[in-house]
Image (cartoon, rainbow, N blue to C red):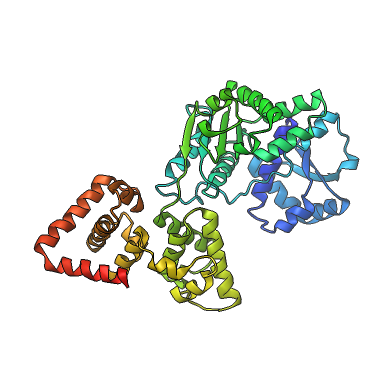
């Protein structure tokens, strides 16, 4: 196999991702495969360069079979793997050696996949767009530009694309990098024209080029010039470009208008703040992946975290980890109820103020409690009779007590159309005229809201 250095690097990354399925110990990769790379694949023999003679000994005696199996799964052919140290390998040219070190510290997390990305009204469109370009590179939506506030899943989608390519598109290569890493690599290899050219050639050798948080190189003029050249070359070759930012392309300051125009020429998608229902789904997914028992959590605890920490996924993770730390280190328990959750999270939120403040989520929570449901059930898409009725009550109270626009109420309830909300409110109003029991329900809920 006469592969280029960039192809060998990509293959080795994919082999390590495959190997991670059978060897979960991160220590193994850091100690024995740190600084490693494929030197060559010739006549059924794959030579891997590692950092020490000890690594050669350990890998040769204990892990050869597993690495050969992973290589066969990735390359599609059986290979015999041998290990050596760099001092024993002749490197042909200075440029070749330099190419081996481009983005060397960049690691793709194999767990960040489309399957593990929890979607809802706030991010479904972005997920679908990312999956589409992964399956159809360079066809129709190029570049794909995803923007949102920090912590809402942009990086997850970027790495999901790379993992999808590695798993499903043999022969295709994907390069993912953070914009700061792009800048650092550019500066590091700016020392000579030959190396600068090598950097551009390396970046344009991939079928997918994904760069995260492009706004971070806004003031770096030379870097942007080089990026513009790389972008144009990739685009002209029909290769897929994916870019993320915390701003819409038109709002990127210090970027050349030509570059902003290129960014906006494909498909621009935003990720919004997740609703409560999506946050609850994220928490359930986190619990399942942590091998914890979902039945050990009061559903209202998940709603508490989802309601108070929905600004971004990192806030949710922080609150959830704080809760686990509390019940592990200070108050061991087999069942996490609301009392324990309040104790654990009181340093992160003012629970008393949160309980007393009248807002959409507070009304939904009280209506849910009145009907012995959870807030996520009230905002769900379920058409179960009692849930639909409780949902209409909550919509009615939000409209009457807060004067919230129908459109905003619809967003609170999972992205429903304003006409759906209006219809629900009108149904409650009609019932109030003829059914005294409904008036009693409304008064009781209002009384609880004032308590």
- Quadrant of the image occupied by residue 101: top right
Q: Nearer the viewer, residue 266 or 305?
A: 305
- Quadrant of the image occupied by residue 330: bottom right
376 left or right of 309?
A: left
Picture residue at 69% right of the left edge, 36% below the top? 182
Q: Residue furthest top?
A: 236
Q: Nearer the viewer, residue 189 or 46?
A: 189
Quarter of the image with the C terminus in it: bottom left
Q: Position of residue 108 (x, y in %)?
A: 64, 46
Picture residue at 80% right of the left edge, 33% below the top? 98
Q: Nearer the viewer, residue 264 or 19?
A: 264
Q: Looking at the image, can residue 241 be seen?
A: yes
Q: Residue furthest right?
A: 87
Q: Nearer the viewer, residue 284 or 407?
A: 407
From the viewer's perspective, is residue 137 above or below residue 386? above
364 left or right of 258?
A: left
């Amino acid at each position: 196999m006469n592969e280029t250095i960039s192809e060998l690097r990509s293959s080795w990354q994919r082999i390590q991702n495959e190997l991670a399925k059978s060897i979960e110990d991160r220590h193994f990769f850091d100690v024995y495969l740190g600084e490693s790379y494929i030197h060559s694949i010739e006549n059924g023999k794959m030579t891997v360069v590692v950092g020490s003679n000890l690594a050669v000994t350990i890998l040769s005696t204990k892990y050869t079979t597993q690495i050969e199996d992973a290589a066969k799964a990735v390359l599609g052919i059986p290979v015999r793997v041998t290990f050596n140290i760099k001092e024993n390998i002749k490197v042909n040219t200075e440029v070749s050696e330099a190419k081996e070190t481009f983005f060397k510290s960049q690691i793709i997390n194999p767990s960040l996949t489309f399957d593990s990305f929890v979607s809802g009204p706030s991010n479904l469109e972005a997920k679908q767009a990312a999956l589409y370009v992964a399956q159809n590179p360079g066809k129709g939506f190029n570049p794909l530009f995803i923007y949102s506030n920090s912590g809402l899943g942009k990086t997850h989608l970027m790495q999901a694309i790379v993992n999808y390519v590695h798993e499903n598109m043999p022969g295709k290569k994907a390069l993912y990098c953070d914009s700061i890493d792009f800048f650092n690599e550019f500066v590091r290899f700016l020392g000579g024209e030959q190396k600068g050219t090598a950097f551009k050639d390396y970046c344009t050798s991939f079928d997918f080029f994904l760069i995260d948080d492009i706004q971070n190189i806004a003031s770096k003029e030379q870097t942007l010039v080089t990026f513009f050249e790389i972008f144009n070359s990739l685009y002209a070759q029909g290769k897929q470009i994916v870019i993320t930012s915390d701003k819409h392309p038109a709002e990127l300051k210090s970027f050349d208008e030509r570059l902003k125009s290129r960014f906006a020429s494909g498909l621009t998608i935003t990720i919004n703040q997740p609703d409560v229902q999506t946050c609850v789904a994220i928490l359930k997914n986190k619990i399942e992946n942590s091998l914890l028992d979902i039945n050990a959590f009061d559903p209202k605890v998940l709603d508490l975290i989802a309601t108070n920490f929905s600004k971004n996924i990192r806030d949710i993770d922080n609150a959830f980890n704080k809760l686990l730390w509390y019940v592990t280190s200070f108050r061991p328990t087999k069942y996490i109820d609301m009392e324990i959750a309040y104790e654990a999270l009181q340093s992160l939120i003012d629970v008393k103020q949160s309980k007393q403040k009248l807002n959409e989520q507070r009304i939904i929570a009280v209506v849910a409690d009145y009907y012995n449901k959870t807030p996520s059930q009230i905002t769900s898409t379920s058409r179960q009779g009692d849930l639909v009725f409780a949902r209409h009550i909550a919509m009615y109270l939000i409209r009457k007590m807060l004067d919230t626009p129908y459109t905003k109420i619809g967003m609170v309830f999972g992205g429903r159309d304003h006409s759906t909300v209006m219809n629900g409110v009108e149904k409650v109003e009609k019932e109030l005229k003829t059914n005294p029991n409904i008036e009693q329900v409304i008064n009781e809920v209002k009384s609880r809201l004032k308590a």
